[in-house]
Amino acid sequence: MGFAVYARGHVPKPGRKEKLGEVEQPITCGGITVNNGDIVIADEEGIVVLERSEAEAILAKVKKDAIKSNISLAEWQVGHRQKISALVKSLSEQAEQK
C-alpha cells in the first residue's frame, strides 16, 4: 500500500451494520478532533493533525527551514535516527539502574 497503519489491535470479523453512519463529520481520536479535510501525518514516533487552513503556512515554514539547514532528507534521517537511538539507549540504561 505504501503507507503505515497504526492500530491497538485488530478485529477479524466486522460488526453488524444496524444503521447508516454519517460522513464528513468531525471525529475525536485520542482526545484530538479531526475534521473533514484535515491532514493527518503519522510515523513511528507519533501523529500530527494539521487543520487544512494551516497547511500552506506550515509547508512554507518547513521549506524555508529545509533551505536553511542545507542537508538532504536522507542526511537528516540518518542524524535523527542516531539521536533517537542514543536517547532510547540512555533511557534503557537508566531503567536498568533502577
Image (cartoon, rainbow, N blue to C red):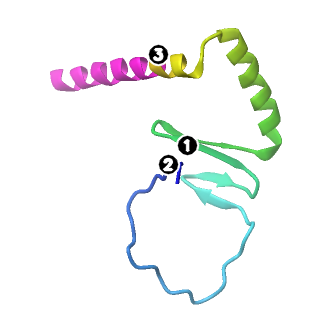
The stretch of residues the image draws in magenta is 80-98
In the picture, the disc for residue 4 is 2
* Residue placed under numbered mark 3 in the picture: 79
What x and y, as percent, mark residue 22?
A: 71, 75
Pair 1/3: label in front: 3
Q: Amino acid at mark 3?
A: Gly
Residue depicted at x 75% and y 66%: 24
Mark identifier at residue 15: none
Q: Is 8 placed above or below 57 here?
A: below
Does the magenta-highlighted stretch encompass residue 16? no
Q: Position of residue 21 (x, y in %)?
A: 66, 79
Instruction: List x then y, in percent, for residue 59.
Output: 76, 30
Identify the mark at residue 42; answer none if there is no mark: 1
Instruction: Give the amino acid type for the residue marked by disc 2 in the picture.
Output: Ala
CB within 8 Å, label 2 to label 1: yes
For residue 27, say whether it is visible. yes
Alpha carbon of mark 2 to alpha carbon of mark 3: how far? 22 Å
Residue at image position (75%, 30%) is: 58
